[in-house]
Image: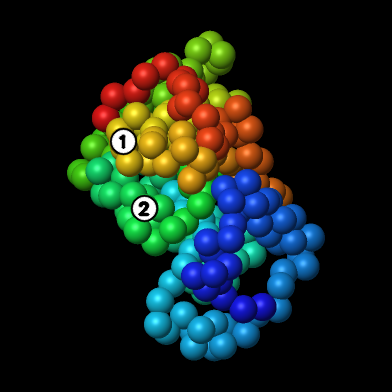
Amino acid sequence: MKAHNKVSQSSLTPHTALEFLREGNERFVSNLRINRNLLQQVNETKEGQWPFAAIVSCMDSRTSAELVFDQGLGDIFSIRLAGAVISDNVLGSLEYACKVAGSKIIVVLGHTHCGAIKGACDGVEMGNLTGLLNKIRPSVQQEKSVAQNRTSQNQEFVHAVTLLHTERSVQQILEQSAILQDMVEKGEVGIIGAVYDVETGVVTFCEHTKRIGQRTEKVVESVEA
């Protein structure tokens, strides 16, 4: 299996790029991963990289995007930080990935049993972590479907906040990056939210968050930076 090159990357559409990720996760779950010669891919990418996707995910050690989507060297940009929160640094990285390097699809990948989500649910404050969790707390406050035991001890509540945080993160990217919003509306790039299940390995895509070649209508209420 060869690494992507400029020709193969440019031939992809956002829809086909997304299908590559869906198929890759199906292979991962079925334990039918593609046999790659990684040293060969090192050689193939020594002069440049042409990733077809940019994935914003959590730093959780169980959620490596290259593994769960069965991709090789040079296939995806992986932007990882606790809670997959959106910041200026993340937006700049995504703008580079899509506008400069040619990636076709952006995925915001949350996951089940996320420690950052749980921390935000419990109002944890600790050093620099406090500022990071403050970016998740609006989702905690906005989540209204669970009325009782709104803490990390309630898995239903944690999962509901995870879904909402993922949706809000997609919206933040579209609202806070004019470059990416324009590319999405022109159909040059797609964006979608998803959640990885750490118990099964399955990635569930949040289809209602998908935006490709259409006006970037609000997925949830406007979000603040």
Q: Which residue is mark 2?
A: 99
Q: Which amino acid lies under the numbered mark 1 shown in the image of this protein?
A: Ala
Secondary structure under tag 2 reads helix
Give the crowd class for mark 1: few <14, some 14-19, many >=20 residues within 10 Å. Answer: few
Instruction: Please determine whether, in this image, residue 58 is positioned above or below residue 6.
Output: above
Q: Which residue is mark 1?
A: 178
Instruction: Please determine whether, in this image, residue 59 is positioned above or below residue 48.
Output: above
Horizontal arrangement in the rendering, residue 75 relative to residue 137 (left or right): right
Q: Which amino acid lies under the numbered mark 2 shown in the image of this protein?
A: Lys
Q: CA distance from mark 1 to mark 2?
A: 11 Å
Residue 206 or residue 163, whichever sits in front: 206
Residue 142 or residue 32, whichever sits in front: 32
Q: Position of residue 17 (x, y in %)?
A: 60, 53
Residue 2 or residue 55, whichever sits in front: 2
Q: Quadrant of residue 126?
A: top left
Secondary structure under tag 1 reads helix
The residue at the point 54 percent across, 82 percent down is 41
Q: Quadrant of residue 206?
A: top right
The residue at the point 28 percent across, 49 percent down is 92
Q: Quadrant of residue 26?
A: bottom right
Residue 67 or residue 112, whichever sits in front: 67
